[in-house]
Amino acid sequence: MRLDQLTDWLGNSSLRRRAIWLGVAASVFVSGFVVRSMADDKPAKVGKPAADKAPAKKPSAAEVSKVDNEPISPKRETAAVAFAQQHHPQLAELLTRLKASHPEQYTKALRELDKTRARLEKARENDAERYAILLHEWQLDSRVRLLAARITMSTSEELETELRQVLTERHDVRLQLLTYDREKSKTRLQKMDEQIAEHVQSRETSIDREFDRIKKTAETRKKPVTRPALKRTGDKDK
């Protein structure tokens, strides 16, 4: 079954089968909805944590459950649904059905979708070309999850062929992202090499300029400040 036939399949399935499938699909989406890599992610630092910093306290199960069940604001819900409608219509259709039949799963999936939307939009502000690759990767991730949920219910040669095709496409997109990041890194390294060469060439000139600036400032501060004499009470102007 192709992904674009999902809506027709849902409409023609029995209510019980649709409910089971929606529950499986929701679990798949909630367990891994956020995109794999973002432009603003910081690389993890290697080494021991600073001695003066206490380890971060892990939230309790009750706290996690409370956050997961908190309702999302109408404004963010509208933005998240609009994002899905624009970039992944099949996902938007699934969310609509989840909202009616599995409201708790809908809230969790919507919250993760909102996080993904916000991160992708931030990535677009930083690098539009990288954003396009990340968006494509997210779309393929979503298709893989939909197909995985479908296979959980029933499998077929056609479905397995489609899954392999989407996995292949996602693999190629991730390779494209790595290649793009490598080229950007090469550009940054080239600029750093130019800055290093400039620092080496201007070493004495930069030191002399800074030395003269500091010395001039110090000499200015050493000069006594002349203040006008204050008039005593009773003195008359001459």
Image (cartoon, rainbow, N blue to C red):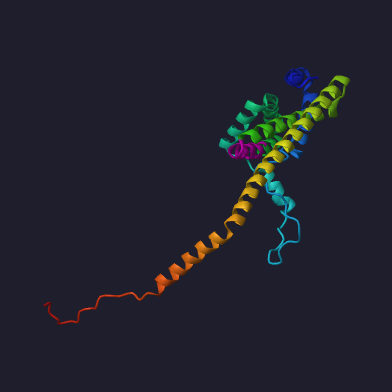
Q: Is residue 42 above or below residue 220?
A: above
Q: Is residue 212 magenta?
A: no
| Depth order, front residue of 95/201 | 201
Residue 68 percent coordinates (x, y): 69, 44
| Depth order, front residue of 52/170 | 170
Image quadrant assignment for residue 119: top right
Most common secondary structure along the magenta stretch? helix
Residue 136 percent coordinates (x, y): 70, 30
Residue at 76%, 39% in the rendered image: 31
Residue at 12%, 79% in the rendered image: 236
Region of the chain picked out in magenta, as a range: 113-127
Q: Is residue 120 magenta?
A: yes
Q: Locate the N terminus by quadrant.
A: top right
Q: Locate the C terminus by quadrant.
A: bottom left
Q: Is residue 131 left or right of residue 211?
A: right
Image quadrant assignment for residue 237: bottom left
Residue 80 percent coordinates (x, y): 62, 33
Residue 8 percent coordinates (x, y): 74, 17
Residue at 67%, 31% in the rendered image: 99
Q: Is residue 13 left or right of residue 156?
A: left
